[in-house]
Image: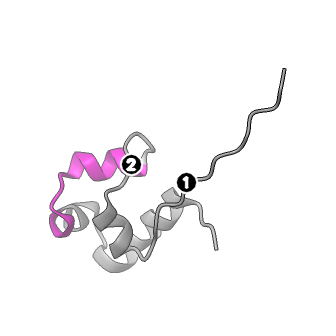
């Protein structure tokens, strides 16, 4: 099942860690990095995804001819 990453990760943090700072400490990253991930400016690390029970999936599609 595909999920919308940002709300899913935000809910995971609230449920498991309560605060972003606690999540950052557990994941070994800065508060600023967690904030950047939640704002869509950075990609989450594999460890963050694994903690949330998620995996990165990349999909490619052929471009339509002009």
Q: State the image coordinates of residue 26 (x, y, percent, origin top left).
A: 18, 70
Q: Would you say residue 13 is visible in this rendering?
A: no
Question: Which of 54 and 11 lies nearest the eye of the viewer?
Answer: 54
| Label 2 to label 1: alpha-carbon separation | 13 Å
Q: For the magenta stretch, what is the residue range?
A: 25-38
Q: Which residue is mark 1?
A: 58
Q: Secondary structure at mark 1?
A: loop
Q: Residues within 10 Å of mark 1 (few under 14, many from 20)?
A: few
Q: Residues within 10 Å of mark 2 (few under 14, many from 20)?
A: some
Which image quadrant is residue 58 in?
bottom right
Quadrant of the snapshot with the N terminus: bottom right
Quadrant of the snapshot with the C terminus: top right
Q: Secondary structure at mark 2?
A: loop
Rendered position, 51 above or below 64: below
Q: Which residue is mark 2?
A: 43
Asked if residue 39 lies in the magenta stretch, the reply is no
Question: Which of 52 and 55 lies nearest the eye of the viewer?
Answer: 55
Instruction: Examine the residues drawn in magenta and state their main secondary structure.
Output: helix
Q: Would you say residue 39 is visible in this rendering?
A: yes
Dot 2 or dot 1: first in sequence order is 2
Q: Residue at x 25, y 67 (%)?
A: 23
Rendered position, 40 above or below 8: above
Q: Residue at x 63, y 67 (%)?
A: 2
Q: Residue at x 43, y 45 (%)?
A: 39
Q: State the image coordinates of residue 12 (x, y, percent, origin top left).
A: 41, 73
């Amino acid at each position: 099942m595909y999920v919308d990453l940002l709300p899913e990760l935000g809910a995971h943090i609230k449920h498991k860690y309560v605060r972003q700072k606690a999540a950052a400490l557990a994941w070994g990253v800065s508060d600023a990095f967690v904030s950047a991930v939640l704002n869509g400016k950075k990609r989450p690390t594999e460890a963050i995804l694994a903690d949330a029970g998620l995996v990165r999936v990349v999909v490619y599609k052929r471009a339509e001819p002009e």
